Amino acid sequence: MSSAHVVMSFEADPRHVETTRRVTKAVLGRAGIRDRDMIGTVQLLVSEIVTNAIVHGNANSVSFQLTCDAAGEVLIAVDDHSSGAPKVREAGPDDEGGRGMQLVTHLARDWGRKGTCTWCTFTVGSG
């Protein structure tokens, strides 16, 4: 396994969530990650944090960073340039949203907020 990294900024538009998913798959592939379940989990984490930044951030742009080191440690960092922090909510069975940060809490090794950036970590294998 090797390291791979990407940094990008884009307009705060929901169409860019799929772009970040594709970029994530490519970066993990460059790092030697082949396990589809691991890639899918990282893509889900990216989707949830990027969507949260787009929907709840109050800026026109979002910055995205994904790093996978040689040990398989993945860092996802999304800066929405706003002062609010994501909240883990208890969504009801009929709610269409409100589960994103629950997923991040459940799937990520750790997550938090530093300044205007929400980050999470995940460990992948070389499978």
Image: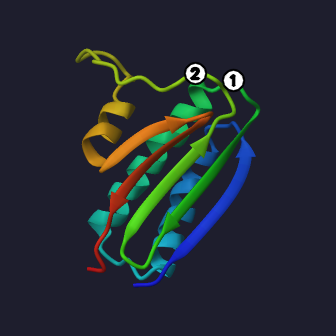
Q: Quadrant location of the C terminus? A: bottom left
Disc nearer the start of the sequence (2/1): 1
In the image, what residue occupies the spot 69% across and 23% down?
58
- Determine whether, in the image, residue 30 is placed left or right of residue 43: right
- Name the disc covering residue 69, or none: none
Q: Is residue 53 left or right of residue 108?
A: right
Secondary structure found at label 1: loop
On residue 84, which mark appears?
A: 2
Q: Is residue 79 above or below residue 22?
A: above
Q: Position of residue 29 (x, y in %)?
A: 46, 77
Q: Which mark is residue 58?
A: 1
Q: Residues within 10 Å of mark 2 (few under 14, many from 20)?
A: some
Q: Is residue 43 above or below residue 127?
A: above
- Looking at the image, residue 110 lies above or below residue 14: below
Residue 61 x %, y %: 74, 38
Mark 1: amino acid: Asn
Query: Residue drawn 58% across and 24% down?
Result: 56
Q: Are marks 2 and 1 in contact (CB under 8 Å)?
A: yes
- Which residue corresponds to the image point at 52% horizontal and 32% vertical from the top-left? 52
Residue under the point 25% across and 15% down: 92
Rounded to the nearest angstrom, the CA distance separating label 2 from label 1 is: 9 Å
- Left or right, 65 with respect to 68, comes to right
Q: Quadrant of residue 104?
A: top left
Mark 2: amino acid = Gly
Instruction: State the image quarter where residue 14 is shown.
Output: top right
